[in-house]
Amino acid sequence: MDTKKKKSTFWEFFQGLGKTFMLPVALLAFMGILLGLGSSFSSESMIQTLPFLGYPAVKAVFQFMSAIGGFAFTYLPVMFAMAIPLGLVRKEKGVAAFSGFVGYTVMNLAINFYLVLTNRLVDADHVREAGQGMVFGIQTIEMGVLGGIIAGIIVYKLHNRFYTVQLPDSFAFFSG
């Protein structure tokens, strides 16, 4: 019976995890449209075909659309790191989402610290070849969406375990 309960809890967790993926993925559709329209209407070939697209104000609008659309794809791991705790926790959802952001950033800082400590941090010219990248100005191992998912799951587990902890009065500011 205990094995059945663990198996049930395991599947419930993954069903909930799958549902949390919907928030960032749903945002991608809209952002993809913005990116596609902005990029296509601000391209040089389109401006040659339709010269009015070359006017500075019109071009700026489409370049802005392209930049906004690209944001979602650039920061997709962060969105997963925030959406997973937001979708899985029952209480204190805002704190959990913010903790997802902080957890993802700390994970990248820890990886950077390890790379510096082991002398594996490469110079800016060889970042891609070494499998490294920049996240919020932090040179780290390029983990992509998987890094965001890992950080989100860890934050979810930690949040569920510690959000009700009551600290002594001298640390009351940090209490759950």
Image (spheres, rainbow, N blue to C red):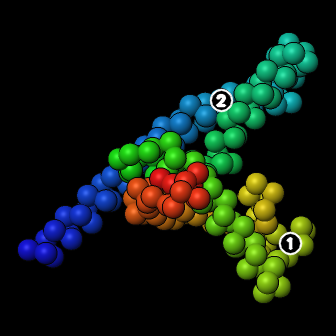
Q: Give 74 or 32, whichever is nearer the viewer.
A: 74
Left of 144 or right of it: where is 115? right
Q: Residue furthest bottom?
A: 118
Q: Earlier in the sequence, mark 1 or mark 2?
A: 2
- The residue located at (50%, 42%) in the rendering is 94
Q: Is any part of residue 148 visible from this angle?
A: no
Q: Amino acid at mark 2?
A: Leu
Res 27 seen here: yes
Q: Residues within 10 Å of mark 1 (few under 14, many from 20)?
A: few
Rounded to the nearest whole Å, what is the CA distance between mark 1 and mark 2?
31 Å
**Image point 66% across, 48% down: which residue?**
75
Q: Which residue is mark 1?
A: 126
Q: Is residue 64 left or right of residue 151?
A: right
Residue at the image position 58 percent from the left and 51 percent from the top = 173
SS state under label 2: helix
User: Where's residue 117, x and y in %?
Assistant: 79, 84
Q: Identify the mark at residue 114; answer none if there is no mark.
A: none
Q: Residues within 10 Å of mark 2 (few under 14, many from 20)?
A: many
Percent x, y of residue 141: 70, 70
Image check: 42 left or right of 156? Answer: right
Residue shown at the point (47%, 53%) measured from the top left: 176
The type of residue carrying mark 1 is His
Depth check: 105 or 65 in front? 105
Percent from the top left, x then y, of residue 23?
47, 41
Hey, which residue is sitting farthest left in the picture?
A: 1
Q: Which residue is at the far front? A: 169
Residue extending furthest toward the top: 52
Q: Which residue position holds label 2?
A: 34
Q: Secondary structure at mark 1?
A: helix
